[in-house]
Image (spheres, grey):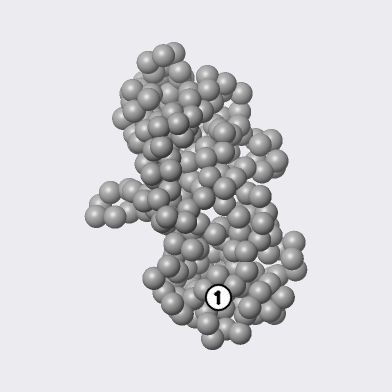
């Protein structure tokens, strides 16, 4: 199957999964879409569960390993669920649904390496930033690409609906778009694209054990990642920020960074 066909099939499957979660929620509530209250008076979509939308796979933030969803974002999500006194439920959603805020009709939170932008802030609220994450251009050693100018006219891949895709367009690069980072990295490894443009964290993780690829240029875009929350839900926002403050204060967030990104993580 061609990559484009696979991406379309996957996006359809993810959309169906999100719809299914919504249907289950309605059934559990006896046909009512009114959220169930959690302990502390904060409204959760599913009683006793903190439902989180993530775009999987996006290593090392969220991916499947030995039948379990793991990653940097997942570690944070587990701590959030603990503070909510709820069970963690992760929904695999397309990033398009997450970054437009659509996923928040089925999920309490979006945790999926979401860069905070003014456009996204117009349709959702964000927690305090929990990671700085600029962009990078990654290429193979034999591609001849040493920077952004060399990449123009070459086959460059990006993940669709991301800041990397926006940056490529702004720089005049006609990039090939992939539905998720897994397909993007596969194309880079297979040689069907010459370079990939995206966040330093995920691309750096993808090539860390592959000496034939290197990061040829970094772009200080000032990106920061945040947790998305339905606009106007101040109680949820305060609760999430409280957990992030705790994780920062007790050293847990730094421990998670070292676990998933190594000693050089920001």
Dot 1, crowdedness within 10 Å: few (<14), some or many (≥20)? many
Q: Is residue 23 visible?
A: no
Q: Is residue 162 visible?
A: yes
Residue 3: percent from the left, percent from the top? 48, 70
For the N terminus, give its image quadrant. Answer: bottom left
Q: Percent x, y for residue 188?
A: 49, 74
Q: Nearer the viewer, residue 27 or 179?
A: 179
Question: Is 163 displayed left or right of 89 in the figure?
Answer: right
Q: Quadrant of residue 253?
A: top left
* Image point (60%, 45%), residue name: 224
Q: Nearer the viewer, residue 2 or 100?
A: 100
Label 1 sits on residue: 139
Q: Eyeballing the image, is 211 above or below 236?
A: below
> Is 233 situated above or below 99?
above
* Residue 95 point in image, percent of width and height: 53, 50
Furthest residue in direction left, as rendered: 66
Question: Residue at horizontal 49%, vertical 76%?
Answer: 213
Vertically, is 146 above or below 206? below
């Amino acid at each position: 199957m061609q990559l484009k066909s696979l991406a379309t099939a996957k996006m359809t499957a993810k959309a169906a999964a999100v719809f299914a979660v919504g249907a289950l929620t309605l059934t559990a509530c006896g046909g009512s879409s009114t959220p169930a209250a959690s302990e502390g008076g904060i409204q959760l979509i599913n009683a006793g569960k903190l439902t989180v939308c993530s775009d999987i796979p996006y290593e090392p933030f969220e991916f499947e390993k030995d039948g379990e969803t793991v990653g940097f974002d997942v570690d944070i999500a587990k701590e959030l669920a603990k503070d909510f006194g709820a069970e963690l439920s992760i929904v695999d959603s397309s990033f398009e649904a997450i970054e437009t805020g659509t996923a928040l009709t089925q999920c309490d939170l979006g945790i999926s390496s979401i860069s905070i932008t003014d456009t996204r802030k117009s349709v959702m609220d964000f927690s305090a930033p929990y990671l700085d994450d600029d962009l990078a251009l990654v290429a193979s050693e034999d591609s001849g690409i040493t920077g952004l100018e060399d990449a123009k006219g070459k086959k460059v891949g990006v993940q669709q609906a991301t800041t990397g895709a926006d940056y490529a367009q702004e720089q005049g690069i006609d990039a090939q778009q992939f539905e998720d980072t897994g397909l993007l990295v596969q194309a880079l490894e297979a040689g069907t694209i010459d370079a990939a443009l995206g966040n330093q964290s995920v691309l750096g993780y993808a090539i860390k054990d592959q000496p034939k690829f290197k990061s040829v240029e970094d772009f200080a875009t000032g990106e920061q990642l945040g947790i998305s929350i339905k606009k106007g839900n101040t109680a949820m926002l305060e609760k999430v920020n409280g957990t992030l403050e705790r994780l920062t204060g007790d050293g847990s967030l730094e421990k998670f960074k070292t676990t998933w990104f190594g000693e050089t993580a920001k």
